[in-house]
Amino acid sequence: MSENAKWYVIHTYSGYENAVKTSIEKFVNGRGMEDMILRMEIPVETVKEVSESGEAKEVERKVFPGYVLIKMVMTDDTWHLVRNVRGVTGFVGTANKPIPLTEKEVAELGIEKHEVVVKYAVGDNVRIIDGPMNSFTGVVEELDVAKNRVSVRVSMFGREMPVELELDQVESLED
């Protein structure tokens, strides 16, 4: 069942984010619904604040005040559990239909990191294992792990051309 889980956004009263998260966690544990409601996140960022006296200190600030992200399997039971927690005003979506976040949105928020182990470097021979260029081989020209990008020079129709791919679309030929 947990493979059907998607990320949703819960709207809360401002300042109630942590209380809502704690309440939902208690309900989930008490009712044995750990396989239905998997994770909750309150995205925070660390910023430096300078006081009037000129003293700088690092402070954690909520990125989206009034919102909690939740990874869950949407059923009538889970919807009612979350919706009836004190401090929750509803899900982000239309009327009574919560809309899940897309994979791209989840990746951009950085709440689920898919770590890719790169076993190749610039100059290595690689095989493309996913996408329209599947099974082509080429040489790595550029590698940007932070942006999850790799540029591979591929020979096609007698011409060499660079192809931009994601890191997990390529594997080393030396394996």
Image (tube, helix red, strand yellow):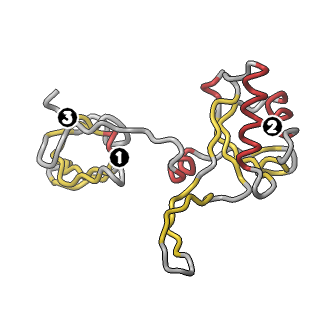
- Residue at 57 percent across and 81 percent down: it is 52
- Residue at 43 percent across and 39 percent down: it is 114
Q: Which residue is tagged 1?
A: 166
Front residue of 38/147: it is: 38
Badge 3 local density, few (<14 within 10 Å), some, or many (20+)? Answer: some
Q: Does 135 appear above or below 159?
A: above
The residues bearing labels 1 and 3 have C-alpha atoms spaced at a distance of: 14 Å
Q: Which residue is tagged 3?
A: 172
Q: Picture coordinates of residue 167 (x, y %)?
A: 32, 43
Q: Amino acid at mark 3?
A: Ser
The residues bearing labels 1 and 2 have C-alpha atoms spaced at a distance of: 36 Å
Q: Which residue is tagged 2?
A: 82
Front residue of 59/42: it is: 59
- Residue at 51 percent across and 41 percent down: it is 112
Q: Name the image quarter holding the C terminus.
A: top left
Q: Judge left or right: residue 137 versus residue 132.
A: left
Q: Amino acid at mark 2?
A: Val
Tag 2 near tag 3, CB within 8 Å: no
Q: Picture coordinates of residue 60 (x, y %)?
A: 56, 58
Please tell me which of labels 2 and 3 falls first in the chain. 2
Closer to the camera: disc 2 or disc 3? 2
Q: Amino acid at mark 1?
A: Glu
Please tell me which of labels 1 and 2 falls first in the chain. 2
Q: Does 145 appear above or below 82?
A: below
Q: Judge left or right: residue 49 versus residue 41.
A: left
